[in-house]
Image: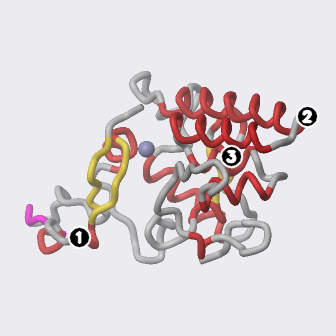
Amino acid sequence: MACLNVDHVRPKGLKDAQGKLRYEHLIYRWDNFLLACVNCNSIKSKKDFTDDGPFLPHTHNLLFHVELGPNGVPRPRRSDKAANKAKAFLELVGLDRHPGHPRHTPADDRWADRMRVAEIAQRQLKHYASQKGVPRLGTILDLAGSNGYFDIWFSVFAEFPEVRRALVEGSTRQGLNVFPGTRRAAFAQADCEPLDR
Ligand SMILES: [Zn+2]
């Protein structure tokens, strides 16, 4: 897995026409920091955007706007104008890149890592659908925790709200909370569908 970077939402290195740093006043502001993997951070680099631009992880529930496409590559989930903002986010950090994409580079292995985890999740889905039960849920949570990619597990188990709930809230029965800090209020109370917020 790629190591974590601290991304500056408004890029710290971007200069204006006079060669002055455009966001110098935001360089040490906590509200300008986001955690990102090294690939997302380096592709985003010095790109800037308007306030009306891409959905960002700290302003919008991206699970509502982005879904898992083929081979683990994320894509916009809706077809309304929100799709453009979801697409703008994926392009900002290059999460839409995979071999065959014009701007994909060999060093960027996010697609491969996501595909690997999507395959594990899909195998677990098959098992779960055929022998539903409490012991299997523990295995799913263990694998989700050790492999990461909340969005992949959440998408693959879309038909099983009890699994989604355990991913979001943890399972008291299993004694596992593999994605602590997940915001419960971002999901519907009854079926754990992501909410538009
Ligand atoms: Zn990333």
Q: Nearer the viewer, residue 158 or 172?
A: 172
Q: Secondary structure at mark 2?
A: helix
Q: How many marks?
A: 3
Residue 130, numbered circle:
2
Badges 2 and 3: C-beta atoms under 8 Å apart?
A: no
> For the point 67% across and 73% down, which residue is it?
195
Q: Position of residue 83 (x, y in %)?
A: 66, 64
Magenta-colored stretch includes residue 20: yes
Quadrant of residue 19 within the rendered picture? bottom left
Q: Whole-Å distance between the Cαs marked 1 and 3?
A: 30 Å
Q: Which residue is mark 3?
A: 68
Q: Earlier in the sequence, mark 2 or mark 3?
A: 3
In which quadrant will I find the C terminus?
bottom right
Q: Earlier in the sequence, mark 1 or mark 3?
A: 1
Q: Which residues are magenta?
A: 19-23
Q: Position of residue 68 (x, y in %)?
A: 68, 46
Please state which amino acid type lies under the numbered disc 1: Trp
Q: Position of residue 183 (x, y in %)?
A: 53, 69
Magenta-colored stretch includes residue 134: no
Q: Which residue is mark 1?
A: 30
Q: Nearer the viewer, residue 60 or 145?
A: 145
